[in-house]
Amino acid sequence: MKQEKILVIGASGQIGVELTLALRKIYGAQNVIASDLREQNPLLEGTGPYVSMDVMNKEMLHVQVIRQNVTQIYLLAAILSATGEKNPNLAWHLNMQGLLNVLDIAREEKLTKVYWPSSIAVFGPTSPKQNCPQQTIIEPTTVYGISKYAGEFWCNYYFHKFGVDVRSLRYPGLISYKSAPGGGTTDYAVEIYHEALAEKSYTSFLEKGTYLPMMYMPDAIRATIELMEAPIEKIKVRTSYNLSAMSFSPEEIAASIQKHIPEFTMSYEPDYRQSIADSWPQSIDDSVARADWGWAPEYNLDKMTADMLTNLKSQG
Ligand code: NAD
Ligand code: AKB
């Protein structure tokens, strides 16, 4: 079997750091090249090769793919929902052109696989709020959501038209303690743990009662790797799979934290991100992912809270 050589684009970000480290464990440090526009995340230093790269520079990306004998790309570079609403042109440009650059190169160089994440942000106010199904009305109202939905159909197109084995998950909001989140609407659910330990209080930018689909990072990394390692015949959705673990509101995550830090208090000052959150489903039906390639989450809210607090405390 041919040795896989993986390029992770956007490796310094919230998912990139943990995914790169997980892939290095499986494929060997030298076979997973981290790359990003910004400097290498300190957590990746000394763990394997790193190249500084802009995914928008197609020529440079192509040269790297050939020079490094890359066989797979994980494309994580993107502008997320909240930052996207502040700079719609940049979000559209990066989220679309970055993906098209990767898909074109994957086609030309006959890469074995490509991974590109979508998001629950594809869904809009007209999608079902509860247990939002794989196939339903999809009318996103954020630039980020529009770019993800268009991206899903580019992936589908490159698979059916050119045979590019590109796979995708619609991640919910991801919660992690290693690398900071990068401008999303669900970021409050990461900030809250840091503030709970440092300040014993947190002001939420989402209102009470705002339920959103969420997932702990170890589940997201495992889902990604399980999807990518699944036999090709099991991957029946070529746009992007719904993926789910838990749903909670700001007051529920606060209550979960209070089980460990009873003096923790919460206040609410909703901002522009509230309308983004209100446009998304509150929970997701991921039964197609479960049936096709055996997805099952491990973490619920309380199990995640215990793990987050333990790890953040030990980081000091
Ligand atoms: P992030 O913002 O933390 O990381 C993105 C990384 O891409 C950053 O390190 C950034 O420097 C890099 N980048 C930006 N522009 C670049 C360019 N032109 N060339 C190369 N690198 C560039 O984002 P993340 O949370 O790790 O998200 C990764 C992917 O997962 C994105 O596609 C995002 O839409 C998707 N996703 C994330 C979440 C979540 O909750 N984190 C949820 C759903 C989907
Ligand atoms: C965001 O809030 O933009 C991301 C996402 C759900 O895609 N976390």
Image (cartoon, rainbow, N blue to C red):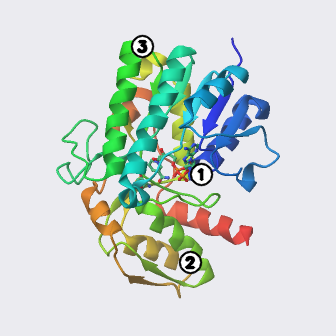
| Callout 3 secondary element | helix
Q: Is residue 28 left or right of residue 161?
A: right
* N-term mark: 2 or 1: 1
Q: Nearer the viewer, residue 237 or 239?
A: 239
Residue 256 in percent (x, y) is at: 47, 72
Can you tell me which quadrant of the image ligand 2 is in? bottom left
Q: Is residue 126 left or right of residue 177?
A: left
Q: Is residue 178 left or right of residue 55?
A: right
**Residue occupied by mark 1:** 13
Residue at 36% across, 53% down? 88
Q: Nearer the viewer, residue 234 or 22?
A: 22
Q: Is residue 294 in view?
A: no
Which mark is drawn over residue 162? 3
Q: Nearer the viewer, residue 303 or 33?
A: 33
The C terminus appears in which quarter of the rendering?
bottom right
Residue lying at the far bottom in this picture: please name it.
Answer: 263
Q: Is residue 3 in view?
A: yes
**Which residue type does callout 3 highlight?**
Phe
Residue 281 placement: quadrant: bottom left
Residue 312 placement: quadrant: bottom right
CA neighbours of label 2 inside 10 A, class few (<14), some (14 to 19), many (20+): some
